Amino acid sequence: MGMTREQGQQVLAAVFSAVKDGELERAWAEARPLLDSWRDDVEAARWTCALATAPELEFERRSALAEALLEAYALDALVPVLLGNEAVQFIDVRFLNASAPVGGPLARLLQVLAAQLEVTTSDAQRVRVAGALAQVAFRLGRDADALCERMHRLLLELEPSRWQRAYDYGLFLKNRGRFEEGVVANQRAATLGGADDESVSWNLGICATGAGQGALALEVWRRACAFKGALGADGLPDGRFHAVKVQVVQRPLASRSARDDTPGDAETLWVDRLSPCHGRVLSPPLADVGVEYGDLVLFDGAPITTHSVNGREVPVFPQLTTLRRGGWRVFPFAGTQPESGAIRRLSEVLPGDSVVYPHTESVCFFCQDCWEKGALSGHDHGDRGTATTVRGKLCIDPSVVLEDADDALRRALKASPHLQFVAPALALALGKDHRAKAEAKTFDALCAALAEG
């Protein structure tokens, strides 16, 4: 006779009581009745799936347990389904734009569940297997998109009145950048009974914003989170929020393909938040990450982490896509100054909203651990640079004539002989080749000095 429901529940209750107390080793000790019997008892194996998918337990340990369960019970009607339904627990879901997972149980789960679906005849079991398979394929990246879509369409066919199926499909469409289709799927989920579900509202609002359906997004945000803004000149919701941070990447998941499903370089930028899910980039990136100062970016509703900045907890959101370019003209610069902040103050003389942004005074370098914790942990992360030598970006307002910005800059520098400021790409854009060539030499020398120092 296998483990009973009551016995399984008792073991899990003891495990999660230990987890709540922060005693993980005790939790695994409480799990011993399951761990000692699951290989010979299918009922115990099914209860053990709850251990393998519990996010509170150590990832490596439970991932190995899931793989062992899967190999022993690949033909069982429930074990692969129970693991597959919780596929999200085998990745770090916070990092929306991470590469597809390598290793772990997901790839094997895909094979096992796909094989089960081929031989399943009852609609009830097809629903169970297809549901789990859709979750696994969703988490395996763009290479499994075609399979994931087939599973969602099958589930919508088999359970057309269940709003959760439409919502799950809408979530997939949102993360893949198919925002117009995501609007339709989430509207269907709302109509079928999910209108009061917060997740449906958020995904509908995000998809509507991504699809450029500003009036719909505004309606959703006003209903879902008492949004006080209105439609801006660009046709999207425009409200007042605290600035937030967004982790942007060269290749967001929404714009990738199976051929190259990697994010490339990543940076965390300040963003002027205009609605619950989009805003304008306020800090020009160091590397080529596909966005620039002034661009509009769409981000997901769940933050990756928070960073403590001047006593305020600032959420850090993952980028979904770039909505549109801001049209700012951006030119790298280098310079010297007698004290920190002197070159930054050149922004005050520039026309429009143009800014001088010194990266060497503004950028923090974090190790991954400190970035996730949101604060430096006392160990060295590298120097930002000297106070006297700086480099960064000059960002010219799209409404400003380039020559006017340059004239204002030249006058300010003439009045401040203690400052040195060169932007060879700006000179080149103005057709001043001789100046560009001379400034390029100075620019290279200053950057070399920064690299050495």
Image (cartoon, rainbow, N blue to C red):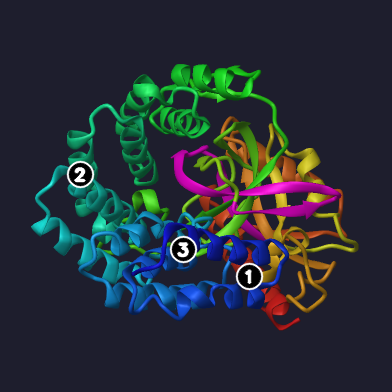
Between label 2 and label 1, give the one nearer the viewer: 2
Which residue is at the front of the view, 332 or 51? 51
Q: Residue 163: where, in percent of width, then height?
A: 34, 30
Query: What's the mark number on residue 124?
Result: 2
**How far apart in space, not on screen, are marks 3 and 2 (Cα)?**
23 Å
Q: Magenta segment, which residues?
A: 304-333
Q: Which of the two residues, 288 or 61, is positioned nearer the viewer here?
A: 61
Circle 3 packing at 10 Å, graded few (<14), some (14-19), many (20+), is: many
Residue at 43% of width from left, 68% of height from top?
Answer: 48
Observer able to see residue 232: no
Q: Which mark is residue 391?
A: none
Quadrant where the N terminus is found in the figure = bottom left
Query: Residue 368 — which label?
Result: 1
Check contact, mark 3 vs mark 1: CB within 8 A.
no
Magenta stretch: dominant secondary structure:
strand
Task: Kindly identify the amino acid type of the residue bearing the numbered disc 3.
Answer: Thr
User: Of the residues shown, which amino acid type is indicated by label 1?
Assistant: Gln
**Residue hosting label 3:** 53
Mark 2 or mark 1: name the one nearer the start of the chain.
Answer: 2
